[in-house]
């Protein structure tokens, strides 16, 4: 069984998150997409709502979607999270972070991490670059972001997240 991992905080889960996961399922030849949430995500140390609350919402999101699963990891770097998966899924903004040496102890460590990644599937976003050898996911969700939801665009949230009331 081929499995893709889709790391993120999903704070909150949006229509774009689901569209990207569905595109990865269609385009990458995987049987399952696993949403992977880090207990201590890089660059997002004080995430609210709590991890437990976000996981409860994500369990509602995956319910009935047999191709979608959820896991929690202690890992922080995408390369470490993606170890053992067939594909790693991300937005182009995350790809930019994966390539930013500031998130590693050195440029060499960054290069080794990027080289260790499984096949990469990237959703285009704004002007952020997409790697030439990546699967470019066919989604048009440029205007959707969790930040926009937290700033008031509740229509971009998945219904399961809206029903939780956590982002009101």
Image (cartoon, rainbow, N blue to C red):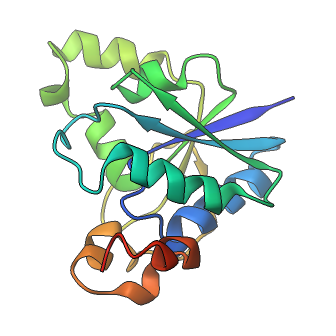
Q: Which part of the image, by quadrant, shows the N terminus?
A: top right
Residue drawn at 18 percent across, 28 percent down: 103
> Where on the picture, by quarter, is residue 79?
top left
Measured along the vertical axis of the image, is residue 88 above or below residue 52?
Answer: above
* Residue nearer the viewer, 106 or 148: 148
Residue 66 in picture, x, y percent from top left: 83, 52
Viewed as shown, does residue 30 lie left or right of 35?
A: right
Q: Is residue 91 above or below residue 103?
A: below
Provide residue 63's location: percent of width, then percent of height. 73, 58
Left or right for 11, reference 80: left
Which of the 4 quarters of the picture holds residue 93? Answer: bottom left
Residue at 29%, 56% in the rendered image: 49
Residue drawn at (36%, 59%) of the image: 11
Q: Which residue: 39% across, 21% down?
A: 75
Residue 126 can be seen in this image: no
Residue 25 visible at all? yes
Q: Position of residue 95 (x, y in %)?
A: 37, 43
Q: Is residue 110 above or below residue 158?
A: above
Q: Position of residue 111 (x, y in %)?
A: 32, 17
**Quadrant in which the C terminus appears:** bottom left
Left or right: where 5 falls relative to 43 = right
Q: Nearest the camera: 120 or 89?
A: 89
Question: Across the whole image, how many numbered discs are drawn on residues?
Answer: 0
């Amino acid at each position: 069984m081929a499995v893709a991992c889709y790391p993120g905080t999903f704070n909150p889960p949006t229509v774009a998150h689901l569209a990207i996961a569905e595109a990865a399922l269609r385009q990458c030849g995987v049987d399952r997409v696993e949403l992977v949430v880090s207990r201590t995500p890089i660059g997002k140390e004080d995430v609210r709502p709590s991890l437990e609350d976000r996981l409860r919402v994500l369990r509602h999101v995956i319910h009935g979607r047999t191709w979608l699963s959820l896991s929690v990891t202690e890992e922080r770097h995408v390369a470490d999270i993606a170890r053992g998966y067939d594909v790693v899924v991300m937005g182009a903004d995350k790809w930019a972070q994966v390539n930013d040496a500031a998130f590693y102890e050195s440029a060499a460590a960054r290069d080794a991490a990027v080289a260790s990644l499984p096949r990469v599937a990237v959703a285009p976003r704004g002007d952020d670059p997409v790697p030439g050898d990546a699967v470019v996911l066919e989604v048009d969700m440029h205007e959707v972001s969790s930040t926009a939801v937290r700033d008031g665009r509740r229509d971009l949230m998945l219904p399961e997240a809206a029903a939780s009331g956590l982002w009101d």
